């Protein structure tokens, strides 16, 4: 237990994450219902498995919400201010990755995120950090562009490097 003041107790954490996973499940179910969710003579339709997975996630979210959110005894400190600050150190650059990938392209944004997360936050020496960031970006590029043949957004560096 940390001496830092409490930001979130266990009950509210369970309620919050049950609601989030329930909302994701509803989105999956809604998306699956836009396709056929039945089993035909040729096998499952496109929405068959996503619909059932969405139902399972929704059921688990409801069970967790009831059992851990409402019926379980209130527990003490779950997330202290110090813990929340540590989580925010990774969350803020992650939001930057999502936003930055729109303008910089996914490969450059991932490299910058890894430099921040590994080098600055994780305090790993810079030559290793840069090697990991560059290696991960190259590995993702090769995997998606050549193996899966699925082009991802490349941003302004794509045309400069001739990798449109």
Image (cartoon, rainbow, N blue to C red):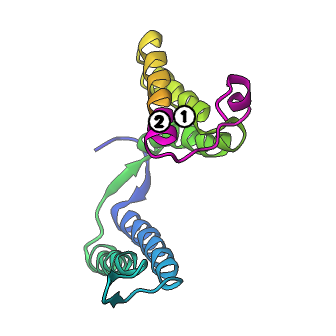
- For this rendering, which residue is in front, 73 or 64? 64
| Label drawn at residue 57 | none
Q: Position of residue 138 (x, y in %)?
A: 49, 27
Name the quadrant containing residue 76. Answer: bottom left
Give the residue drawn at x 41%, y 17%.
124
Residue range highlighted in magenta: 141-164
Within 10 angstroms of label 2, few (less than 14), some, or many (20 or more) residues?
Answer: some
Judge left or right: residue 74 versus residue 155. Answer: left
Badge 1 or badge 2: first in the primary sequence: 1
Give the residue at mark 2.
140
Residue farthest to the front, as pictured? 42
Judge left or right: residue 99 versus residue 30. Answer: right
Give the residue at mark 1.
110
Within 10 angstroms of label 1, few (less than 14), some, or many (20 or more) residues?
Answer: many
Element type at mark 1? helix
- 1 and 2 marks in contact (CB < 8 Å): yes
Give the residue drawn at x 39%, y 51%.
79
**Mark-to-mark CA distance, 1 and 2:** 9 Å
The answer to whether residue 137 is above or below residue 10 is above
Q: Quadrant of the C terminus?
A: top right
Given this view, does label 1 or label 2 mark the residue nearer the observer?
2
Q: Can residue 78 be seen in this view?
A: yes
Give the residue drawn at x 41%, y 86%.
37
Q: Is residue 30 magenta?
A: no
Q: Is residue 154 magenta?
A: yes
């Amino acid at each position: 237990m940390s001496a830092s003041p409490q930001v979130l107790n266990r009950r509210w954490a369970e309620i919050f994450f049950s609601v989030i996973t329930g909302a994701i499940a509803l989105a999956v179910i809604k998306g699956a219902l836009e396709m056929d969710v039945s089993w035909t003579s040729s096998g499952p339709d496109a929405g068959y498995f996503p619909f059932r997975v969405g139902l399972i996630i929704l059921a688990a979210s409801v069970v967790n919400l009831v059992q851990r959110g409402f019926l379980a005894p209130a527990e003490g400190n779950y997330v202290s201010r110090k813990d929340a600050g540590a989580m925010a150190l990774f969350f803020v650059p992650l939001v930057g990755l999502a936003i930055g990938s729109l303008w910089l392209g996914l490969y450059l944004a991932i490299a910058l995120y890894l430099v921040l997360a590994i080098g600055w936050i994780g305090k790993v020496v810079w030559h290793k950090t840069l090697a990991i960031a560059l290696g991960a970006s190259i590995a993702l590029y090769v995997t998606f562009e050549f193996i899966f043949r699925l082009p991802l957004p490349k941003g302004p560096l794509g045309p400069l490097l001739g990798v449109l």
